[in-house]
Image (tube, rainbow, N blue to C red):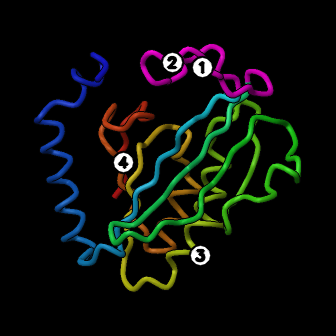
Amino acid sequence: MPVQRMKSLTQDVGEKWFECLDQTYKKYKIERPDQVFNCDESGFATDPSAGFVLARRGSRVVTAIGGSGRGQISVLACCSAAGKVLPPFVIYKAKKMNSTWTEGGHPGATYTVTESGWMETEPFTSWFNKAFIPKVKDIKGNKVLIFDGHNSHISIALIESAIKNNIILLCLPFHSSPSATSFSHWM
């Protein structure tokens, strides 16, 4: 664990977050695991030459998978505490989507592009409205979406949509998620 994470995620911070989670569950009557979702994204470089290659110790020939340059692909995964896995959201680094990039993808997956290949505010809000809400709208009662609270996720449009659809946005503490860079708490 990096030093910054060890210093940021103290036992006190963790305990306070779980107290907040417990209070949220009570206040909004979150009583079933199908009401609780978590999402996070991971980035994948398309040029592994600058990274590491894992191989069995003693291997004589190790082949790296070639990429198309110094690109970036991000994938957002989301699932419920009951084990319901939503289709992935894939973000390519490009200015325009190439339709062949979606061929053979996971059924129901959604795709977009950003100039960096990283998650940005508009794509996250779009995923929330067009992919997340339709998948959870038939679940009775309030729902909770737990996520890292990065500033690319938070927007007024997201908060308004969450309120309208009885979804409580709950952000993890700063540096408790591999991609977390800020802490926000919306209730």
The residue identified by callout 1 is 62
Residue at 81% over, 57% down = 103
Q: Amino acid at mark 2?
A: Ser
Q: Marks 4 and 3, how far apart in space?
A: 21 Å
The residue carrying pointer 1 sits among few (fewer than 14), some (14 to 19) or many (20 or more) residues within 10 Å by Cα, namely few
Q: CA distance from mark 1 to mark 4?
A: 41 Å
| Residue 179 percent across, percent down from the top left | 45, 34
Query: Which mark sits nearer the N-terminus, 4 or 3?
Result: 3
Q: Which residue is mark 3?
A: 134
> Which residue does the numbered mark 2 point to in the structure image?
59
Query: Crowding near pointer 3: few (<14 within 10 Å), some, many (20+)?
Result: few
Query: What percent of the width, then of the height, locates residue 185?
Result: 34, 48
The image quadrant where one finds the C terminus is bottom left
Q: Provide residue 126's location: percent of width, then percent of height.
A: 66, 57
Q: Which residue is mark 4?
A: 171
Q: Amino acid at mark 4?
A: Cys
Whether 51 is among the magenta residues is: yes
From the viewer's perspective, is residue 149 above or below residue 77? above
Q: In the picture provided, is 180 more to the left or to the right than 131?
A: left
